Image (spheres, rainbow, N blue to C red):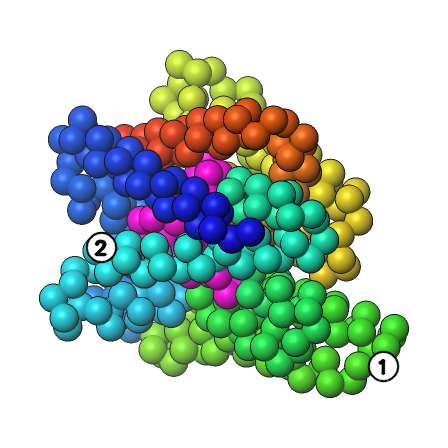
């Protein structure tokens, strides 16, 4: 079951890299500057310079400014481990992400096989790697490393390996803040196991699961000399606040001729598609932890403002079960149609990645 998934993933990664190389050449930028644009530059700073102490202050507002204190350290530490061997940050990040995304796509297929049939599970994984913003699985972003731990946590949960589920969720939480949602999924599954089967040992996994997130936040506080450094930087520097989605629907009203019109419209339509797929995925009545993940994940992606709306599709990539309805529909198509559509999706992901990382005046 896994071989065609891995082959398609590697082909898709090659197509995305080709798109990034082409975009770099056409834009006159170096390939290195393209793949380290936006979040990649922040992770590079974190790997080389660490966290600021004290936190920088915006002189015009008197509030805490944007800084690396808004990012967790696990991924930069992984890339930094390769740098003494002469591997630059950007290349180390791409190597780590190739390995991590390959592992993630296989685990996603195994998760899908827990409640979908074999072909649908394969397609779930293929849709994830060909998702429109999947270029972030190749460049030095955290989505690949985060998803491999998050998906492993979900797989262990569904197989009732409680301690392993808790450890994997903790590792996910150490990479990205949405990892706390997977810790919540472990707790939800534990409560269900206790109520239905009196599996009290499940509480061990539930206790382990949030430790990675707490350790990451605590480490930032320790390095910056301020306990609430991550929270205040997220709030004041990166404007991450509970908005209940009030801002992004305005993207739908923008003209394509506006300065950011086309990418904003694309993001808005993609967001609508994701929300509809999420509702459909919940209607399929998957296992309870997956329902919890989808509900809380969608709320986190669309209800919390920060870096405008452009990060929401990236957040939802890690809550991959939302793609299950699309996998089911695609499984009913003839095989040549399925693979042709997936191939077109991979090419489209390369075009989107090339545009955002080489040309877009906004962050992805």
Q: Identify the residue at horizontal 68%, vertical 69% (top origin).
A: 159
Which residue bears the numbered disc 2?
90
Q: Nearer the viewer, residue 328 or 263?
A: 328
Q: Report if residue 138 lies within the magenta region.
A: yes
User: Residue 171: horizontal and vertical position, in percent?
Assistant: 49, 72
| The C terminus sits in image quarter | top left
Asked where in the image residue 243 lies, by quadrant, the reply is top right
First in residue order: circle 1 vs circle 2: 2
Q: Is residue 79 visible?
A: yes
Q: Is residue 304 visible?
A: no
Which residue bears the numbered disc 1?
198
Q: Nearer the viewer, residue 80 or 152?
A: 152
User: Residue 56: horizontal and vertical position, in percent?
Assistant: 30, 63
**Which stretch did the figure color magenta?**
129-150
Q: Nearer the viewer, residue 233 or 74?
A: 74
Q: Secondary structure at mark 2?
A: helix
User: Residue 183: horizontal and vertical position, in percent?
Assistant: 62, 69
| Rendered position, 50 above or below 317 | below
Q: Nearer the viewer, residue 265 or 183?
A: 183
Q: Identify the residue at horizontal 16%, vertical 63% (top origin).
A: 87
234 relative to 60 in the view: left or right: right
User: Residue 39: horizontal and vertical position, in percent?
Assistant: 33, 51
Q: Secondary structure at mark 1?
A: loop
17 relative to 327 in the view: left or right: left
């Amino acid at each position: 079951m896994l071989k065609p998934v891995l082959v398609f993933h590697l082909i898709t990664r090659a197509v995305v890299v080709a798109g990034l190389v082409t975009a770099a050449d056409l834009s006159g930028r170096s390939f290195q500057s393209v793949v380290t644009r936006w979040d990649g530059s922040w992770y590079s700073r974190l790997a080389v310079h660490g966290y600021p102490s004290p936190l920088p202050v915006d002189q015009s507002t008197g509030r805490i400014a944007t800084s690396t204190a808004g990012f967790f350290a696990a991924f930069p530490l992984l890339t930094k481990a390769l740098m003494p061997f002469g591997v630059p940050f950007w290349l180390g990040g791409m190597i780590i992400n190739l390995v991590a995304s390959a592992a993630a796509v296989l685990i996603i297929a195994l998760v899908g096989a827990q409640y979908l049939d074999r072909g649908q599970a394969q397609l779930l994984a293929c849709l994830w790697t060909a998702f429109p913003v999947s270029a972030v699985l190749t460049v030095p972003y955290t989505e690949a490393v985060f998803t491999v731990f998050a998906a492993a946590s979900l797989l262990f949960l569904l197989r009732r390996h409680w301690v392993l589920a808790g450890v994997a969720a903790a590792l996910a939480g150490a990479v990205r803040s949405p990892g706390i949602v997977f810790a919540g999924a472990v707790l939800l599954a534990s409560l269900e196991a206790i109520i239905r089967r009196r599996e009290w040992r499940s509480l061990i996994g539930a206790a382990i699961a949030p430790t990675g997130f707490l350790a990451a936040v605590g480490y930032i506080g320790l390095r910056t000399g301020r306990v609430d450094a991550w929270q205040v930087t997220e709030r004041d520097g990166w404007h991450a606040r509970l908005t209940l989605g009030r801002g992004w629907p305005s993207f739908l009203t923008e003209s394509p001729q506006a300065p950011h019109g086309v990418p904003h419209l694309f993001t808005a339509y993609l967001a609508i598609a994701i929300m509809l797929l999420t509702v459909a995925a919940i209607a399929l009545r998957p296992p309870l932890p997956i329902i919890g993940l989808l509900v809380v994940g969608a709320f986190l992606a669309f209800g919390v403002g920060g870096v405008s709306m452009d990060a929401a599709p990236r957040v939802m990539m890690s809550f991959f079960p939302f793609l299950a309805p699309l996998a089911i529909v695609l499984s009913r198509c003839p095989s040549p149609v399925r693979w042709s559509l997936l191939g077109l999706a991979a090419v489209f992901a390369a075009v989107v990645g090339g545009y955002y990382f080489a040309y877009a005046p906004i962050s992805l």
